[in-house]
């Protein structure tokens, strides 16, 4: 196998600076609840929230639709739900990647029923070509081609999350 760099560490960090500034301005004077969608978003979320200077309450949700395969199963399973009551709160959902949009569509529908004051989405990556379940990404890092990517929180069978850059995984060498 081989890993080709798609987005460098410097590019990611620069983009996160911009997103954080935008979020800081948009939530000026509002209490913000950030929901980190585990597992993949943990590194993006950690870097993002440390740059946003507004007061933030952080909670976590875990949902999976992929397993160990590079092909989506089309099923969403919620393994960990929120502890916080989000009614009348301003919610920012932080996700690693929007591929088909299935995961986010399900999560947004679930959270919408709990009557938050507002709900926005930040995603580091978005596979434009897929877009099977359209979701509106309010704060987007990068639009990418339809490639299986790893690194910066994203895994292949639980590995490579620690890479500081986004790479493209190739089975061949
Ligand atoms: P969706 O429901 O949008 O099709 O898929 C979203 C989830 O699938 C992401 O949160 C992520 O866990 C996983 N996923 C989608 N594309 C990729 C990819 O290219 N690489 C990795 N590692 N995971 C992906």
Image (cartoon, helix red, strand yellow):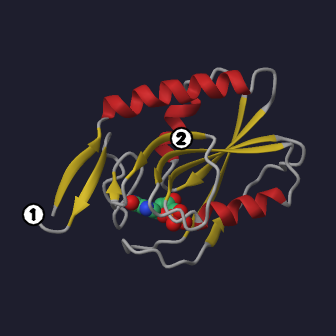
Report the residue at 86% width, 43% height from top: 117
First-in-chain label (2 vs 1): 2
Work out whether 168 lies above or below 63.
above
Identify the residue position indicated by label 2 in the image: 140
Residue receiving disc 1: 173
Classify 10 Å Cα crowding around label 2: few (below 14), some (14-19), many (20 and above). many
Front residue of 64/145: it is 145
Q: Is residue 76 left or right of residue 87?
A: left
Cβ of mark 1 under 8 Å from ligand 1: the answer is no
User: Which residue occupies 66% across, 23% down?
Assistant: 24
| Camera sees residue 107 | yes
Name the mark nearer the viewer: 2 or 1. Answer: 2
User: Would residue 54 be seen by someone viewing this image from the given angle?
Assistant: no
Image quadrant occupied by the N terminus: bottom left
Q: Secondary structure at mark 1?
A: loop
Nearer to us in this view, 88 or 7: 7
6 relative to 115 in the view: left or right: left
Residue at 81% x, 21% y is: 29
Residue appearing at x 47%, y 72% in the figure: 66
Q: Quadrant of the C terminus?
A: bottom left
Q: Position of residue 171 (x, y in %)?
A: 19, 68
Is 98 placed above or below 119 here?
below
């Amino acid at each position: 196998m081989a890993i080709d760099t798609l987005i460098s560490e410097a590019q990611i960090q620069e983009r996160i600076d911009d997103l954080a500034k935008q979020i800081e301005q948009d939530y000026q004077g509002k209490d913000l609840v950030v929901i980190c969608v585990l597992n993949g978003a943990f590194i993006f979320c950690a870097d993002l929230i440390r740059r946003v200077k507004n007061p933030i309450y952080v909670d976590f949700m875990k949902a999976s639709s992929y397993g160990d395969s590079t092909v989506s199963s089309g099923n969403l399973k919620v393994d960990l739900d929120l502890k916080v009551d989000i009614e009348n709160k301003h919610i920012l959902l932080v996700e690693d990647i929007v591929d088909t949009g299935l995961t986010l569509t399900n999560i947004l529908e679930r959270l919408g029923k709990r009557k938050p004051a507002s709900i926005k989405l930040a995603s580091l990556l978005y596979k434009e070509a897929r877009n099977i379940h359209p979701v509106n990404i309010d704060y987007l890092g990068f639009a990418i081609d339809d490639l299986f990517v790893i690194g910066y929180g994203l895994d292949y069978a639980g590995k490579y999350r620690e890479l500081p850059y986004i790479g493209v995984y190739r089975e061949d060498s």
